[in-house]
Image: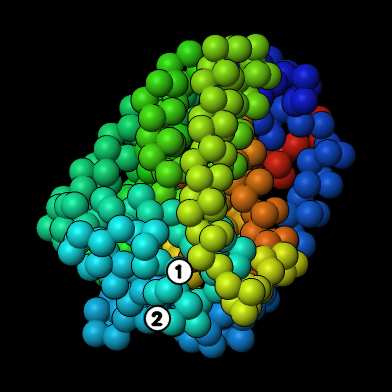
Amino acid sequence: MGSNDAGADRLAEPTASSPGWDRFAHWEAWPARLLLAVLATLLVLAALASLTVRKDAAPNGSETPSMASSAAVAATQRDDDLRLYDRVIERIAKGESYYAFIVAEQRARDYPVRPAVAVRLPTLAYLHAALGGTGMALAALVLALAVLLAWWRRLGEEPGGQEHRLLAMALLAGGAALGLNRDFFVLHELWAGMLLALAFGLHRPGRWGASLAVAALALAIREHALPFVLLLCTMAAWRRDWKEAAAWAALVLAFAAGLGWHVAQIHPQVLPSDPQGPGWLALRGLSGWLANVVLSSNLRLLPHELAGPLVVLALLGWSGWRSPAGSTGSLLYGGYALAFMLAGRANNYYWGAVIAPAFFIGLAFAPRACISLLRAARGPK
């Protein structure tokens, strides 16, 4: 992982045409041919995959958060999830305690309260109630600018990042733009995703304090940020940076304690008559991953036959970028891809917003990765 993973790539001496950060340029022919075959298969399947949102898995039979719909529609006709979050924020702003009403509120709207983790963490609702609509809009703008600045600096410091920085920043801006849509400010995944993009951009091996603090806030908003924290902990341990690994591990323990307290507040209010919420193990396969990313990002504006393959190419670009950021991104987004294939119902597609803001940076490196794979597949001259 990081800049010392030469054993996996069997590196040749870097040249002007094949710099050390270009992972696939240093591969041997047969591994490159195998990956090309897998890539071609995935691109075809991605173009054919169904990226639709069904309401059959929704707990109350309603439509799902309409990030895939236009902003004009969302502004005039908010769906059940958004109206629930609106109501929660309204009651907190009036001085009510979250745990005094949330179970009854969800039960009245036919939303599950079993298991207790079906009830969202209260962090975002309290922040929204405290800041108000204008404050949240300002916070979103500041967060978006911080994400852009953090990645501008990181791309300038990473091998290969400087020459791809302008295109990568344009792709990042497109991915982060959804975080400025105030119609979806009540969605936990939107804020968690922007915070994770910032934490990723701020992180450096040996300089991780700011990243840890931002990731902690993301984790307090949505538990789906946990894979990022676990990955950073694992990578620090791999580098034998025990101080950083211990800090990330401490954050995991603090989150576990906080989640346990949250469950303890909900559990006594759950009635035997409350139905069990539908399971998240849906095994949706490739379409699950693609739908989550496409429908929770601006790729939703493209034909799905084009949007699906672009998701695959973005992950290839991260994998071909041999640098600390590239290694982190390929493991992080590859891990989320696998998780989305296994878990999450069709109406949970907005989980993709947790990774969407910075994910498309990988597309800046995808053309070079494809060219290097093709050259490596031809074998030595």
Where is residue 132? Give x, y as percent. 16, 58
Q: Total marks drawn?
A: 2
Which mark's residue is nearer the viewer, 2 or 1? 1
Q: Is residue 323 visible?
A: no
Which residue ends up furthest to the right in the rendered image? 30
Which residue ends up furthest to the left in the rendered image? 134
Rendered residue at 65%/27% (across/down) = 234
Q: Is residue 350 visible?
A: yes
- On the rendered image, what quadrant is the N terminus found in? top right
- Which residue position is annotated with label 1? 103
Rendered residue at 64%/38% (across/down) = 331
Where is residue 290? Give x, y as percent. 60, 65
Left or right of 84 on screen, residue 312? right
In terms of depth relative to the viewer, which is nearer, 158 or 175?
A: 175
What's under tag 1, amino acid-wise? Val
Where is residue 335? Give x, y as percent. 66, 46
In terms of depth relative to the viewer, which is nearer, 137 or 325?
A: 137
In what element is the residue under mark 1? helix
Left or right of 208 on screen, residue 313? right
In terms of depth relative to the viewer, which is nearer, 284 or 360?
A: 284
Rendered residue at 21%/43% (across/down) = 142
What's under tag 2, amino acid-wise? Asp
- Which residue position is annotated with label 2? 80
- Image quadrant assignment for residue 56: bottom right
Judge whether 286 appears above or below 157 on screen.
below
Where is residue 92? Give x, y as percent. 25, 61
Rendered residue at 62%/79% (across/down) = 273
Left or right of 78 on screen, residue 43? right
